[in-house]
């Protein structure tokens, strides 16, 4: 089957794939079987916990075609674990991680024609867990809905390959507090960044780099992506904390840099001043992949990297990651899950 999509001009807009998944659970009982149904709206109580008190969690996972004709998910087990931890923190019933992976595999199988051709993009899968039962007094919802939809996507920040983007350090707002929720894909983390991000875009930036809320000195991350900088043979990234999202691509880039490129990797507090003297900077995420940073503006001063071009280390890391995802390089860390061969034992 084919669908009428212009693969060459894919950005990060929603183009819903035809099938979505939906399952509900009452706390204390096992998850229901759930069902794969045509993509579309569903009804929700006005008193749903998610609408009133923000009890909600998201994930983001990609499936891509490989050169030899497979369709593979990238490390869905990692998203499954993070999703279960986030659910527990938000007092929601976690989905068993194996089950989560099976549902991702089946979503891809049922939406195969929405997976872009090799190298033109991926199928982005968005699992959500919401408190959908009605609740008035502040507390945990009496029922939860796990829903999954998908959309083919291309590049997040700019169309047309690996293009360096400009970032601004956010000096008026903190994304995440110490001991806060920044380390989870809690839905409430995102709405507060919409206005500052829109304002940064009006000033010509692609987004913000956020500093830690305590000292306003150390880089945390780039809004929806983790931050890295390169100095000589050293790759530096902020060490994880409860205010930094533990990215799957972050962890993968660290492995590639250590084990394939032989770089020294430093995970520690990373002062903005240190990053401003780096050779190269980039940010990583499922959506952002590896996005080179052209410049960082901090206290009205713009620091430019690699004359606005992609630096050599950033280029290497991007190539390694995307060539593994496309099956061009050997998958030596066993990151890919072949959606045709994966045995659906729990469904
Ligand atoms: C999703 C996300 C990332 C990137 O995580 P990946 O697992 O690499 O996709 C980074 N920061 C924030 C705030 C995120 O929501």
Image (cartoon, rainbow, N blue to C red):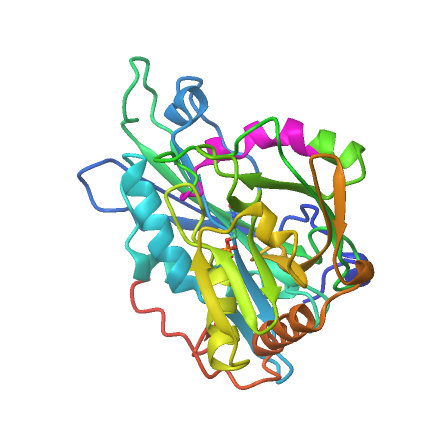
Relative to 189, does residue 119 appear above or below in the rendering? below
Relative to 54, does residue 342 appear above or below in the rendering? below
Q: Residue furthest left?
A: 28
Relative to 180, does residue 23 appear above or below in the rendering? below
Residue 183 position within the rendered picture, expressed as x and y whole percent measured from the top left? 41, 44
Q: Is residue 74 visible?
A: no
Q: Is residue 107 left or right of residue 309?
A: left
Helix, strand or loop: magenta stretch = helix
Of the pair 22 and 86, the residue shown nearer to us: 86
Q: Residue at x 45, y 43 (%)?
A: 185
Q: How many marks?
A: 0
Q: Is residue 201 left or right of residue 22?
A: right
- For the N terminus, the image quarter is bottom right
Residue 190 position within the rendered picture, expressed as x and y whole percent measured from the top left? 54, 34
Of the pair 16 and 155, the residue shown nearer to us: 155
Tell whether position 279 is magenta.
Answer: no
- For the C terminus, the image quarter is bottom left
Q: Residue at x 80, y 34 (%)?
A: 203
Q: Is residue 206 left or right of residue 150?
A: right
Residue 202 position within the rendered picture, expressed as x and y whole percent measured from the top left? 79, 32
Residue 168 picture quarter:
top right
- Which region shows up in magenta? 183-197
Q: Is residue 342 visible?
A: yes
Tell whether position 194 is magenta.
Answer: yes
Of the pair 124 and 235, the residue shown nearer to us: 235
Residue 55 position within the rendered picture, expressed as x and y whole percent measured from the top left? 38, 30
Q: Is residue 83 left or right of residue 67?
A: left
Of the pair 268 and 243, the residue shown nearer to us: 268
């Amino acid at each position: 089957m084919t669908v009428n999509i212009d693969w060459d001009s894919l950005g990060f807009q929603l183009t819903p794939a035809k099938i979505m998944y939906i399952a509900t659970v009452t706390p204390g009982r096992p998850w229901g079987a759930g069902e794969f149904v045509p993509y579309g709206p569903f009804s929700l109580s006005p008193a749903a916990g998610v609408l009133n008190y923000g009890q909600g969690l998201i994930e983001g996972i990609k499936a891509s075609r490989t050169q030899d004709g497979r369709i593979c998910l990238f490390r869905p087990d990692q998203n499954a674990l993070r999703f279960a931890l986030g659910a527990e923190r938000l007092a929601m019933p976690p989905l068993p991680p194996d089950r989560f992976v099976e549902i991702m595999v089946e979503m891809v199988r049922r939406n195969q024609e929405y997976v872009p051709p090799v190298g033109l993009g991926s199928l982005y899968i968005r699992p959500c867990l919401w408190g959908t039962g009605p609740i008035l007094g502040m507390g945990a919802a009496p029922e939860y809905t796990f829903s999954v939809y998908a959309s083919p996507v291309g590049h997040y920040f700019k169309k047309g390959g690996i293009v360096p983007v400009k970032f601004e350090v956010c000096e008026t707002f903190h994304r995440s507090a110490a001991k806060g929720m920044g380390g989870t894909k809690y839905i409430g983390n995102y709405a507060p960044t919409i206005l500052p991000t829109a304002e940064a875009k009006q000033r010509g930036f692609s987004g913000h780099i956020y500093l830690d809320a305590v000292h306003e000195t150390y880089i945390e991350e780039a809004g929806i992506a983790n931050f890295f900088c390169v100095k000589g043979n050293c790759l530096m990234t902020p060490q994880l904390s409860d205010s930094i999202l533990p990215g799957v691509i972050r962890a993968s880039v660290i492995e590639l840099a250590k084990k394939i490129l032989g770089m020294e990797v430093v995970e520690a507090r990373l002062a903005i001043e240190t990053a401003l003297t780096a050779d190269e900077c980039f940010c990583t995420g499922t959506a952002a992949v590896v996005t080179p940073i052209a410049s960082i503006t901090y206290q009205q001063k713009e620091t430019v990297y690699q004359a606005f071009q992609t630096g050599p280390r950033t280029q290497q890391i991007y190539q390694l990651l995307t060539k593994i995802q496309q099956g061009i390089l050997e998958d030596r860390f066993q990151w890919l899950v072949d959606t045709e061969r994966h045995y659906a034992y729990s469904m």
